[in-house]
Image: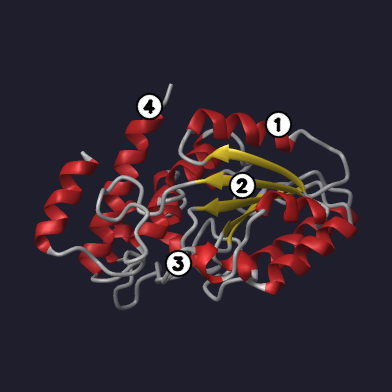
């Protein structure tokens, strides 16, 4: 049985080393959804296989918060979608792995970067499956900062109208945008109630408890009630490194040499 906590540490260590080598990268936004990624990709939730990448009946995963792509890259390489050597050239000249994911990367279903569009794309995919009477699911990971955009709520209305219970939306609720706390900008609370008013079947879970995440994902995936599902995952931006955690000053910047020593010690 996989040691999930150990896997999370290894993923965060690799994320940080990739960003340091490249001299760029969104580390704290990537750290906040590491456990969510582990639950989805290692917890037997997603029906995907690197040997059958074009399988028509595969589940689709859309990373709407594309700036958090370092987590996705590490996981996909670990699952043999592409060589681990590619990670060493992240954001380099001619690299397959850019600062935001695109469809040329094996395992990536949709290009993302400009926020607020992922759920609309995911809703279209889910509707396609419904219309064709296919039984695959679409999972979409949103940042809570992008949930302040109107396009997200339009997609929720659309998915509710079309009864897309094969659409599972996951919100990385770390309560921080790129420059400040979400509730100081355009408040989302009462977030759960708002989502329910828009027709979503809504759940809340600790976004760093992998066992709880796997349990709720399985429950939601098996629930057929004609409603799109939204899972609010309460997380900590910068999880794992003390000076990054829950700080509005940490989004894209990289640690100094002194801070890097602290981070490496904490991640071990």
128 left or right, relative to 235: right
Is the residue marked by circle 3 packed among few (<14), some (14-19), or many (20+) residues within 10 Å? many
Using the image, tell me which numbered label, if any, was put on residue 219.
Answer: 1
Q: Which of marks 4 and 3 is nearer the N terminus?
A: 4
- Label 1: element kind: helix
Spatial separation of the CA atoms under disc 2 and disc 1: 14 Å
Which residue does the image show at 86% across and 52% down from the upper left?
Answer: 130
Q: What residue is disc 2 on? A: 232
Discs 2/4, front: 2
Using the image, tell me which numbered label, if any, was put on residue 3.
Answer: 4
Q: What residue is disc 3 on? A: 67
> Would you place residue 233 above or below residue 209 in this image?
below
Is the residue marked by circle 1 packed among few (<14), some (14-19), or many (20+) residues within 10 Å? few
Spatial separation of the CA atoms under disc 2 and disc 4: 24 Å
Q: Which of marks 2 and 4 is nearer the N terminus?
A: 4
> Would you place residue 251 above or below residue 164 in this image?
below
Please provide percent x and percent y for residue 39.
Answer: 52, 37
Which residue does the image show at 78% across and 64% down from the upper left?
Answer: 124
> Would you place residue 55 above or below residue 86 in this image?
above
Name the quadrant of the N terminus.
Answer: top left
Spatial separation of the CA atoms under disc 3 and disc 1: 29 Å
Name the quadrant of the C terminus.
Answer: top left
């Amino acid at each position: 049985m996989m040691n999930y906590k150990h896997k999370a540490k290894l993923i965060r260590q690799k994320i940080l080393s990739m960003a340091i080598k490249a001299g760029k990268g969104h580390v704290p936004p990537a750290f906040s959804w590491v456990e969510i990624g582990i639950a989805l990709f290692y917890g037997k939730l997603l029906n995907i296989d690197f040997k059958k990448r074009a399988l028509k009946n595969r589940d689709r995963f859309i990373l709407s918060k594309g700036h958090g792509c370092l987590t996705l890259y590490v996981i996909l390489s670990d699952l043999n979608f592409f060589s681990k050597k590619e990670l060493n050239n992240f954001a380099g000249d001619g690299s397959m792995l850019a600062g935001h994911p695109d469809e040329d990367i094996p395992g990536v279903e949709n290009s993302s970067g400009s926020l607020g569009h992922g759920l609309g794309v995911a809703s279209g995919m889910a509707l396609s499956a419904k219309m064709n009477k296919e039984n695959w699911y679409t999972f979409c990971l949103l940042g809570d900062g992008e949930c302040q955009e109107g396009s997200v709520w339009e997609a929720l209305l659309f998915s509710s109208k079309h009864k897309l219970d094969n659409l599972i939306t996951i919100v990385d609720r770390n309560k921080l945008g790129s420059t400040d706390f979400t509730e100081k900008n355009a408040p989302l609370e009462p977030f759960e109630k708002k989502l329910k008013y828009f027709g979503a079947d809504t759940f809340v879970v600790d976004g760093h408890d992998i066992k709880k995440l796997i349990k709720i994902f399985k429950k939601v995936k098996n629930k057929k009630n004609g409603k799109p599902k939204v899972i609010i995952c309460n997380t900590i931006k910068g999880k794992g490194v003390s000076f990054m955690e829950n700080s509005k000053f940490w989004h894209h910047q990289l640690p100094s040499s002194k801070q890097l020593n602290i981070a490496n010690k904490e991640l071990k």
